[in-house]
Image: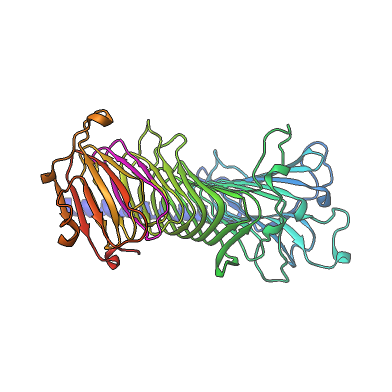
Amino acid sequence: MAGQIKKGFFFYFGLFVLLLITIFFICLVIMIFNPGKTLLWMQYFSSNSYIKLEKTTDTNQADIDWSNITDLEIECGYGDVIVEKNSDDKMTEDGVYIFNGAKGFSGASSAVKFAYEVSYTGPTKLNLTVTEPNGFLYFSKDFKIVVHASTAKRSELDTEHGQINFANMNLTVKTDEGNVQIGGVSTKQAQPVGLKSLKVETGSGNILTTDMFDATTLVEKSELKEDDGTEERRAFDLRTNSGDISSSKNIEFAGKSGKGLALNVESCFITNKGKIEFGILTTSWQKNILMTCKSGSVNIGFLNAAKTRCVNCVQGNYLFDYVQGGLFFESEDSIISPNVRVKYLDGDFFLSENKELGGKPDVELYEVTGDVSMLVDNGSLSVLKAHKNVIVDSKDNLKVNVVMAEDVSGNINIVNQSGNVNLGFMGKVPSNVAITTDKGDVNIKITNSAKFVANSWVNNQAAEDERTRVKENKIDVNIGNEITDNNPTKNPLNVNQSGSGESGNIEITTNGNIKFTLVALEDFATA
């Protein structure tokens, strides 16, 4: 009897649950066919419409003359922003179009409906703020803001609202989640889009310049002032929090080709957790690039700029195949701990951490034609082939591995508190080589063309005339008997080989061990 009652309870309970589910789905169907209707504390929103901006939404209700707009600012949430110049059946006239195709459910009490505000904030400056419908469940986030210039014949255009002059327009775009695409697609009789200046900020949205983006019309930042006439703005400024910055345009430069940008102005690329990726990124002579990647990645095949400054690099990964110009990593107000790899740097390399906050960068430079300066306490520095000055200053434990090229023409000054110093010479030894460490060991590799005198001193902070030489039992010399027969002492060590030029000079100050090793030229890794 108890079993029958139990079975009966579950039977009727199941029917009750099934009824609730049926009622819920009926309500969903009713809401879907009646967008905006509230049932079960929910609303369904849906749209599939284009809106062309023709008048402002303020009390003036002023007509928008696109031919007179020199500054356009767009701000939105998850909507994509597209800038294009082509022919389109739906957008036959110049102007800004808003396409709302968003669908989903929102809470009735928190629902935000689609809206937009457009107004003049100056004689030729237009601001557009778009609010997309919000929800807790989206079936579609298809929402676009299109800045469109038509390629149709002039007689077919809207003469009342004028033609957009991209080359005279300073465009600013801010989105939370939306992607920004400059140039549009290369179909439908597309033509290049060239702006006077471009500034983009996104949250999680990606920033893409396409095949149809023309960078030659950009105007140098010194010619662009803010309203008060004091603060300059960069002519090309792309920033995103977690999105990616890239280009789909094929670029050729210095015999190399790839997807990228060829700019004639100073530029800025910033991401927090996203990715900056270009096959080629180049600027005209004497123009600089500012680049920040806090915890994301930078991957650039060919980089050309007078100076590329990478600032506030917390944990970013930087990979460059070929760099022309100076590459500078600096800290302003955050820990600098990037992972940097450069295959070929035709210029100077500089990295300096914030001494108060510290840092631990890992730097690997395959070949550097300019100076190398590293002012950091921890981490590692590896240079497989350096041609000029090498300056390293560390007050802690920095792993130092540096190999000097055969044609070295600079000086070497390495200060390292407790880390080991590994130094190699492919050919001659410079006249000024100074290595200072407290607890670390010093390992020097040479080829059979090296000539030098090495003096080794104990690191006891004594005056120069009171210094103590390192005991010879702490110095290991393995450079061939024929070299040491005429000079059996290890300190100073006089290596007088067949190398051309004057003899170099090595000054070593350390409390650790010292080792000299003769190796073949091919034993030095170069890649």
Examine the image and state in which quarter residue 121 appears: top right
Q: Is residue 15 magenta?
A: no
Q: The C terminus lies in which quarter of the figure?
A: bottom left
Is 13 placed left or right of 25 in the picture?
Answer: left
* Up/down of 439 relative to 82, above or below: above
Which region of the structure is painted magenta? 391-418
Question: Is residue 21 shown left or right of residue 439?
Answer: right
Q: Position of residue 474 (x, y in %)?
A: 13, 45
Query: Outermost residue toward the left?
Result: 473
Rendered location of residue 204, percent (x, y) = 51, 49
* Residue 408 among those drawn in magenta: yes
User: In this view of the protein, which residue sits in the foreground, 297 or 159?
Assistant: 297
Colour scheme in use: rainbow
> Residue 300 appears at what percent x and percent y?
49, 59
Task: Tell which of 147 and 254 is nearer to you.
Answer: 254
Left or right of 452? Residue 306 is right
Asked whether the viewer can see residue 131, the reply is no
**Which residue lies most toward the front here?**
486
Q: Residue at x 85, y 62 (%)?
A: 157
Q: Is residue 281 visible?
A: yes
The image shows residue 397 at horizontal and vertical percentages of: 26, 40
Which residue appears at 17% of the width and 48% of the height? 490
Say which of 130 and 321 sits in front. Answer: 321
Indicate left or right for 265 with 203 as reference. Answer: right
Name the one closer to the observer, 370 or 449: 449
| Numbered circles on residues, count | 0
